[in-house]
Amino acid sequence: MYIRSLQWSMDINGDGKLSMWEIWETLRWAFQLPGNLILEAIGQFPALATLLHVQASASTGYSSLNTVPTKALTLLFWICLFLWLVSRGNKPAAQAKPRTLLLPLPKDYPVTMK
C-alpha cells in the first residue's frame, strides 16, 4: 500500500545542504503526520471517504492532505498524547507498581527453607 504522507525529503531544493526553512518544513511535516495518516486511512475506504468528502487516495487524488481537517485531527492527536503522558506520570506512590530487579543467585549461596 502506497502511503503518500510518509514521502518526505529533508533536502527539498536538492543543493546538498540543510537550511533553516528546510528544517522548519520538516518539523511542520512531522507535526502534521498523524492527521495526514488518519485521513489517508479514511481515504482507503471509498464509502467512508465519499461520506466525509475525503480525497486522500491514489484513485481520488491527495487534495485533502494538509488541510484544516488534517490540522484539527493532528491537534486532537497531540493533545490526547500530551494528556495521556501527563496523567500517566502523576500516579500516587501507592498506585505505582514497584520495580524490582531479580538476579540469579550464585551456585554456592546458602539457601534455607523455612
Image (tube, rainbow, N blue to C red):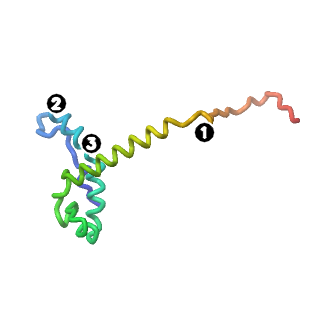
**Residue at disc 3, secondary structure:** helix
Q: Earlier in the sequence, mark 3 or mark 2?
A: 2
Name the spot of residue 108 as percent of width and height, x first: 79, 28
Neighbor class of circle 3 (other Cα within 10 Å; few <14, some 14-19, many 20+) is few
* Nearer to us in this view, 33 or 97: 97
Which one is closest to the eye, mark 1 or mark 3? 1
Counting residues from the start of the chain, the first of labels 1 and 3 encountered is 3
Residue under the image location 77 percent in, 30 percent down: 107
Residue assigned mark 2: 20
Secondary structure, mark 2, is helix
Q: Which amino acid type is shown beneath numbered disc 1? A: Gln
Sort mark 2 into few (<14), some (14-19) or many (20+) by Cα contacts within 10 Å. few
Task: Residue 64 in the image: state x and y as whole percent.
Answer: 19, 57
- The residue shown at (30%, 60%) is 41
Q: Quote the CA–CA distance across marks 3 and 2.
A: 15 Å
Q: Which mark is residue 30?
A: 3
**Closer to us: 82 or 114:** 82
Q: Secondary structure at mark 1?
A: loop
Quarter of the image where the N terminus is located: bottom left
- Badge 2 amino acid: Met
Residue 61 higher or lower than 105, as above or below: below
Asked if residue 104 is positioned above or below residue 35 in the image, the reply reads above
Query: Mark 1 near mark 3, Cβ–Cβ under 8 Å?
Result: no
- Measuring from the top left, give residue 34's x and y in whole percent: 30, 49
Q: Position of residue 52 (x, y in %)?
A: 24, 65
Which residue occupies the extreme right position in the image? 114
Up-down relation of residue 4 to residue 54 (above or below): above
3D distance between C-alphas at marks 2 and 1: 46 Å
Residue type, mark 3 in image: Ala
Q: Which residue position holds label 1?
A: 95
The answer to which of marks 2 and 1 sits earlier in the sequence is: 2
